Image (cartoon, helix red, strand yellow):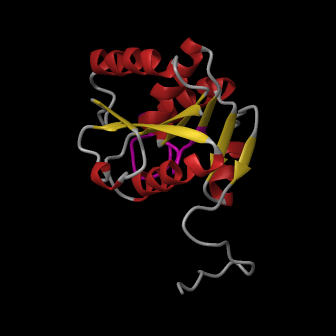
Amino acid sequence: MTHIALVCEPPDGGVAEHVRQLALGLPSRGYEPMVIVPREFAHLHELGGVREVLTLPFRRDYRHPHDELHVVASLTRVLRGTALVHAHSSKAGVLARVAATLTRRPAVYTPHAFPFVGEMSELRRRFGVVVERALAPATAALICVCESERELAIQHRLRPRRAAVVYCGCPPCSNGDVAEMP
């Protein structure tokens, strides 16, 4: 089977659940997932059927460059045994795309919200845009979880090799209203 690395930085919530679902679904399509997550990943015990789960010391901030280099070095070693890396979240997206570039592996990136979106200082917002633009050429495919995320990528001139919208969580509404939950 072909190994695919699923790199996820948030320890829980929607992103982690999305990665869990991918990991559980990949084997039926002929792929062996390798899930790479923070130590406190909340769903480790629920990943029945996933043979490989690797934990790394991801941090939410960027104030510890030594730790980031350690994670990139660890990812680089691990990615040599995979055919593809799929990063989830902006932090995992940065580290995994750098490691994928170093190992010449294609990188798919699902931001689940770009690092320049939300309440933050203007400096941090600009930093997020610069980092995303710098890493866009190393992104084989950008998977946006909604149309507005894809529009943000266009607006900020992020230019991955490919981009697509794959709705996450619920079907899109045809009339723009909020979807009713079944």
The magenta-colored residue range is 109-123
Residue 71 lies, in percent from the top left, at 35, 22
Residue extending farthest left: 40
Residue 7 lies, in percent from the top left, at 45, 36
Write the residue at 71% across / 33% down: 160
Residue 102 lies, in percent from the top left, at 55, 12
Write the residue at 43% across / 35% down: 91
* Res. 9 visible in picture: yes
Write the residue at 31% across / 47% down: 11
The answer to whether 17 appears left or right of 178 in the picture is left
- Name the quarter where the N terminus is drawn: top right
- Name the quarter where the C terminus is drawn: bottom right
Check residue 56 for magenta coloring.
no
Name the main secondary structure of what is drawn in magenta. loop
Identify whether 96 is placed above or below 173.
above
- For the image shown, how many numbered marks are present on the structure? 0
The part of the image, by quadrant, that contains residue 134 is top right
- Name the foreground residue: 60 vs 19: 19
The part of the image, by quadrant, that contains residue 146 is bottom right
The answer to whether 141 appears left or right of 73 in the picture is right
- Name the foreground residue: 79 vs 133: 79
Identify whether 33 is placed above or below 105.
below
Check residue 113 for magenta coloring.
yes
The answer to whether 162 appears left or right of 94 in the picture is right
The part of the image, by quadrant, that contains residue 162 is top right
